[in-house]
Image: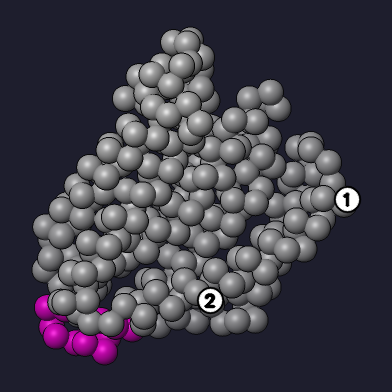
């Protein structure tokens, strides 16, 4: 669909294949890596949440869900920031310099989708624990339809081109979240307690990016070694801010294990 849309926008078949191959080789695997981390957290939490839901232990359910949300946010938000601000530096560690130009811009456009899919996964996990097994299927189906429609329209326009692929992903998860949020609000209650951890982690992730961007612009150049320094610096700053803000889920993980 994407290659056909690029050809419709005026690209040759070889160029369309090259662009799409760059996107699926560089940007998509990095997005899927972040997705696999957040999904594994929610999959591990599902049986615990289900037990509390079946036993009607509301307080324990809400506490465990809050921890799951906080842990998911702790990993998802820095990934969003890293891919958004330092996509080129990350890809330089893994691929040749010549191939990262297009892939880095695609990864930057994909970065907000990491936060959206993390929130969506937490919401759907809570709904599944409450017995809403069909909700994630319907939610993701709605998002899939939205992605097909939006990507087909945008990729076929010459002024958008391949950028329509990550933008279509963003739209699809936004549509899925709207559907799941409506069901969550009707079956469980207010959503703020669920996503407030995302605001704290988002604040830490954005603040940590400020000195890292300054370091990148004034002291580092584009090399593997300097990219490693930049990412390590960002990671250390983010961990420090998370510890200071209380969003670092160390103590809560011990309580969850009990």
Q: Would residue 29 be visible to someone looking at this image? A: no
Q: Position of residue 163 (x, y in %)?
A: 48, 35
Quarter of the rendering occupied by the C terminus: bottom left
Q: Is residue 106 left or right of residue 70?
A: right
Residue 200 in the image: above or below residue 38: below
Left or right of residue 186: residue 118: right
Query: Is residue 38 placed above or below 247 in the rendered structure?
Result: above
> In the image, 125: left or right of 112?
left
Residue matched to label 2: 200
Residue 61 in magenta? Answer: yes
Circle 2 crowding by C-alpha within 10 Å: few under 14, some 14–19, many from 20: some
Q: Rounded to the nearest whole Å, what is the CA distance between mark 1 and mark 2? A: 29 Å
Element on which disc 1 rests: loop
Q: Is residue 169 above or below residue 70?
A: above
Across and down, in percent, residue 182 comes to: 21, 69
Nearest the camera: 194 or 165? 165
- For residue 125, the mark is none
Front in this rendered view, residue 26 or 144: 144
Residue pointed to by mark 1? 219
Look at 80% across and 44% down and name the residue there. 226
For disc 1, the neighbor class at 10 Å (few under 14, some 14 to 19, many from 20) is: few
Tell me which residue sits at (52%, 62%) in the image.
Answer: 77
Left or right: residue 239 versus residue 133 is right
Give coordinates of residue 56: x percent, y percent: 14, 85
Callout 2: helix, strand or loop?
helix
Is residue 171 visible in this depiction of the protein? yes
Q: How is the image coloured?
A: one colour
Q: Residue, x 57% and y 33% (percent of image)?
A: 103
Q: Earlier in the sequence, mark 1 or mark 2?
A: 2
Q: Quadrant of residue 133?
A: bottom left
Q: Position of residue 48 (x, y in %)?
A: 25, 72
Task: State which region is magenta.
Answer: 53-63
């Amino acid at each position: 669909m994407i290659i056909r849309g690029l050809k419709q926008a005026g690209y040759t078949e070889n160029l369309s294949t090259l662009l799409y191959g760059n996107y699926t080789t560089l940007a998509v695997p990095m997005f899927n890596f972040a997705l696999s981390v957040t999904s594994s957290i929610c999959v591990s939490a599902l049986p615990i949440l289900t037990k509390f839901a079946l036993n009607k232990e509301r307080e324990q359910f809400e506490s465990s869900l809050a921890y799951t949300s906080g842990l998911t946010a702790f990993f998802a938000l820095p990934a969003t920031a890293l891919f958004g601000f330092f996509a080129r530096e990350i890809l330089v560690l893994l691929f040749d310099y010549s191939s990262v130009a297009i892939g880095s811009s695609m990864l930057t456009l994909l970065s907000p989708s990491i936060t959206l899919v993390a929130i969506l996964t937490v919401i759907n996990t809570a709904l599944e624990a409450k017995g809403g097994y069909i909700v994630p299927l319907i939610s993701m189906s709605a998002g899939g339809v939205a992605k097909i429609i939006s990507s087909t329209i945008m990729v076929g326009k010459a002024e958008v081109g391949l950028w329509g692929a990550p933008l279509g992903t963003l739209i699809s998860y936004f549509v899925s979240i709207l559907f799941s949020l409506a069901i969550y609000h009707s079956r469980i209650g207010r959503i703020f307690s669920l996503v407030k951890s995302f605001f704290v982690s988002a604040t830490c992730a954005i603040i940590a990016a400020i000195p890292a961007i300054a370091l990148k612009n004034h002291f580092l150049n584009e090399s593997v070694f300097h990219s490693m320094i930049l990412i390590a610096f960002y990671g250390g700053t983010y961990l420090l801010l998370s510890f200071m803000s209380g969003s670092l889920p160390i103590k809560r993980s011990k309580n969850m294990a009990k």
